[in-house]
């Protein structure tokens, strides 16, 4: 491999993207059930949500695969097919409340378990079939020993 110029290592993800054929139905899930605040949107193409210091980008795949038509925003086409995955950090003492809220909304809990390090995860699906996980942030805590 060639010598590469130095650059600082990124410190966090700023955006994450999920894809949904039924954009409106999936957007309603993230707004009404998950409680995320809507951000910018283009009807039929995307709905963006505030997610802490970052953003959840929800795209309709056939629309995001099209070349840009606005020269001021030359974002390359992109997209994915099939279910994706998003993990949301939830305090350990909030996970039972999330499980109760999801069940009350008619959302099936696919898995609820503890990892070998003791962190707990709850898994469900959004209306597009994306895997949604609520997890104790200790799941990825680095061992400081």
Image (cartoon, helix red, strand yellow):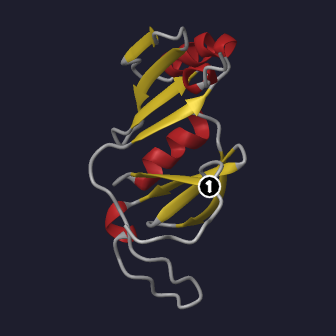
Q: At which x and y percent is residue 10?
A: 62, 54
Q: Quadrant of residue 92?
A: top right
Residue at the limit of the structure toward the right, as seen here:
53
Residue at 65% from the left image edge and 59% from the top image edge: 8
Residue at 39% from the left image edge and 15% from the top image edge: 111
Q: At which x and y percent is residue 116?
A: 46, 9
Residue at 35% from the left image edge and 77% from the top image edge: 66
Left or right placement of residue 68 versus residue 82 in this view: right
Label 1: how many Cα within 10 Å (few below 14, some 14–19, many 20+): few
Residue at 45% from the left image edge and 32% from the top image edge: 132
* 74 versus 145 height, above or below: below
Q: Quadrant of residue 1?
A: bottom left
* 112 versus 72 height, above or below: above
Q: At which x and y percent is residue 52?
A: 71, 43
* 142 versus 38 height, above or below: above
Q: What is the secondary structure assignment of the residue under circle 1?
A: loop
Q: Quadrant of the C terminus?
A: top right
52 vs 69, nearest the viewer: 52
Disc count in the image?
Answer: 1
Q: Which residue is mark 1?
A: 9
* 109 versus 60 height, above or below: above
Left or right placement of residue 55 versus residue 29 in this view: right
Q: At which x and y percent is residue 87?
A: 51, 33
Residue at the limit of the structure toward the bottom, as seen here:
71
């Amino acid at each position: 491999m060639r010598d590469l110029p130095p650059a600082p290592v990124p410190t966090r993800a700023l955006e994450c993207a999920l894809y949904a054929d039924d954009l409106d139905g999936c957007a309603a899930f993230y707004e009404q059930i998950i409680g995320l605040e809507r951000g910018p949107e283009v009807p039929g193409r995307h709905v963006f949500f505030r997610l802490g210091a970052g953003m959840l980008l929800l795209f309709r795949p056939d629309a995001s695969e099209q070349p840009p038509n606005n020269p001021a925003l030359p974002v390359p086409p992109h997209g994915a097919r099939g279910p994706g995955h998003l993990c949301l950090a939830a305090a350990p003492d909030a996970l039972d409340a999330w499980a109760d809220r999801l069940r009350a909304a008619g959302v099936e809990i696919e898995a609820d378990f503890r990892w070998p390090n003791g962190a707990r995860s709850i898994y469900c699906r959004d209306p597009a079939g994306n895997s949604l996980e609520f997890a104790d942030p200790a799941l990825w805590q680095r061992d400081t020993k």
